[in-house]
Amino acid sequence: MDKRRGNVDYSLYLVTDSSLLPPSAKSLEDHVEQLIQGGVTVMQLREKTLSTAEFVQRGKRLLEITRRHGIALIINDRVDVALAIDADGVHVGQDDMGHSHVVPRFD
């Protein structure tokens, strides 16, 4: 699977953040690892309350996990974080910034 060329399996798309952890989870990283082993095929990291530095660090740790398992990591809303960690993509919702602010222009 070559995620960089768009060959991503979207059949089981996980959207998560640290606020969604069940009480039994040791950490978000541990929980994500278990969910991937359970069949998750692509993951979106959404963190609304972390600082940029904390988001980048969490994203790097999760990227190690997703790359090890060969699945894509998508960052929610934060193009800067996605670029900083070399994520596989970024999700920008309809009410978020427009695509002209996200995609660099080369004209």
Image (spheres, rainbow, N blue to C red):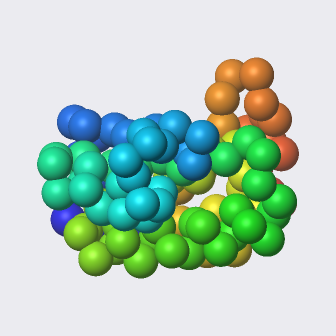
Q: Determine the residue positioned at 83% across, 45% down.
A: 101
Picture quadrant of residue 5 = bottom left
Front position in the image: 101 or 44: 44
Is residue 71 visible in the rendered structure shown here? yes
Relative to residue 98, is residue 15 drawn left or right?
left
| Direction from residue 102 to residue 83 in the image, left or right | left
| Quadrant in which the C terminus appears | bottom right
x and y percent of residue 23 in the render? 44, 42
Depicted 16 relative to depicted 32: above or below:
above
When the figure is inspected, residue 71 is found, relative to residue 56, above or below; the finding is: above
Instruction: Identify the residue at horizontal 27%, vertical 50% (top origin).
Output: 35
Residue 66, image x, y percentages:
35, 66
Q: Residue at x 36, y 71 (%)?
A: 65
Q: Nearer the viewer, residue 44 or 7?
A: 44
Q: State whether residue 7 appears in this view.
A: no
Quarter occupied by residue 106: bottom right
Q: Nearer the viewer, residue 25 or 14?
A: 25
Which percent across, then down, holds residue 97?
Answer: 81, 35
Tell whether 62 sits left or right of 91: left
Farthest-out residue, top: 95
Viewer-proximal residue, 85 or 89? 85
Percent across and percent down for residue 91 are 59, 42
